[in-house]
């Protein structure tokens, strides 16, 4: 036999009532559950979007989970965007190497110094009129490719544009969140996805 306390929003087994009484914690609003309530609320699971609550008579019922505050929703959406940006940067940039092999150039934040160094070296080599393969790059597959300065400049410029495009997308989505937040438009914030 179970009892329900609306004030505590919890169930209490009658078999432990003596222990609760001794501790002075048995709720004074506890009511005995009917069999249908025991099956639905103690043994069952809340429907999606609902949680345990009580009706006007202090009996258990499923009540709608209130929406999170819009500011919290906006914070969660910003975090989702940041995570998606990081994931896409970690996936890297698809790139076809001079031999036709499809590879992925790494574009994580820790890869940026290497890409910048390669771009500077490539421009220096180009300024020296070097047009033969003179630089190496290691890609996600861990393969090394030797590129001409022109090929390296194309690759590093594309990696920079790839990263900028992802960052621009992030800022655009965050701007949309801010705009929706100023007009208290929950639905627009909820609809924003990467």
Image (cartoon, helix red, strand yellow):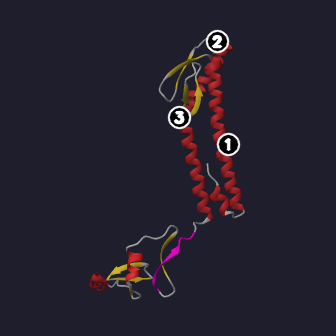
Using the image as rendered, state which of residue 136 and residue 63 is in the foreground: 63
Q: Is residue 9 magenta?
A: no
- Answer left or right for 14 relative to 64: left
Q: Secondary structure at mark 3?
A: helix
- Give me the residue at 68% from left, 60% from top: 181
Q: Label 3, label 2: how many angstroms apart (C-alpha)?
A: 29 Å
Categorize mark 1 by other alpha carbons within 10 Å: few (<14), some (14-19), many (20+): few
Which residue is the site of mark 3?
110
Viewer-closest of 42 and 140 = 42
Mark 1 secondary-structure assignment? helix
- Given this view, does label 3 or label 2 mark the residue nearer the observer? 2
Q: Are marks 1 and 2 in contact (CB under 8 Å)?
A: no
Residue 33 drawn at (x, y percent): 38, 84
Disc 2, SS: loop
At horizontal 66% and vertical 15% (from top left) the residue drawn is 126
Query: Mark 2 and mark 3 in contact (Cβ < 8 Å)?
Result: no
From mark 1 to mark 2, how far is it between C-alphas?
34 Å
Residue 193 vertical position relative to residue 10 in the rendered view, above or below: above
Q: Sequence-wise, which precedes: disc 3 or disc 2?
A: 3
Q: Position of residue 81 (x, y in %)?
A: 59, 49
| Magenta-tinted stretch | 58-66
Looking at the image, is 56 positioned above or below residue 146? below
Q: CA distance from mark 1 to mark 3?
A: 19 Å
Q: Which residue is mark 2?
A: 131
Is 62 included in the stretch rendered in magenta?
yes
Binning the other alpha carbons within 10 Å of mark 2 as few (below 14), some (14 to 19) or many (20 upward) gives some
Residue 23 on image: x %, y %: 30, 83
163 left or right of 55?
right
Residue labelled with disc 1 = 168
Q: Nearer the viewer, mark 1 or mark 3?
A: 1
């Amino acid at each position: 036999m179970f009892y329900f306390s609306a004030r505590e929003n919890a169930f209490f087994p009658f078999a432990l009532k003596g222990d609760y009484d001794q501790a002075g914690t048995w709720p004074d609003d506890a009511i005995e559950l009917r069999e249908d309530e025991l099956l639905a609320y103690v043994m069952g699971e809340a429907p999606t979007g609902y949680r345990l609550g009580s009706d006007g008579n202090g009996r258990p019922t499923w009540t709608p989970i209130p929406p999170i505050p819009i500011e919290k929703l906006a914070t969660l959406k910003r975090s989702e965007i940041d995570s998606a940006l990081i994931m896409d940067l970690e996936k890297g940039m698809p790139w076809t190497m001079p031999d036709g092999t499809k590879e992925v150039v790494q574009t994580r934040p820790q890869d940026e110094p290497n890409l910048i160094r390669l771009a500077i070296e490539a421009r220096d080599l180009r300024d020296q009129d070097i047009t033969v393969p003179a630089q190496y790059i290691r890609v996600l597959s861990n393969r090394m490719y030797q590129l001409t300065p022109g090929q390296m400049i194309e690759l590093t410029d594309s990696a920079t544009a790839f990263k900028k495009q992802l960052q621009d997308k992030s800022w655009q989505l965050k701007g949309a969140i801010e705009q929706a937040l100023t007009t208290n438009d929950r639905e627009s914030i909820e609809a924003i996805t990467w």
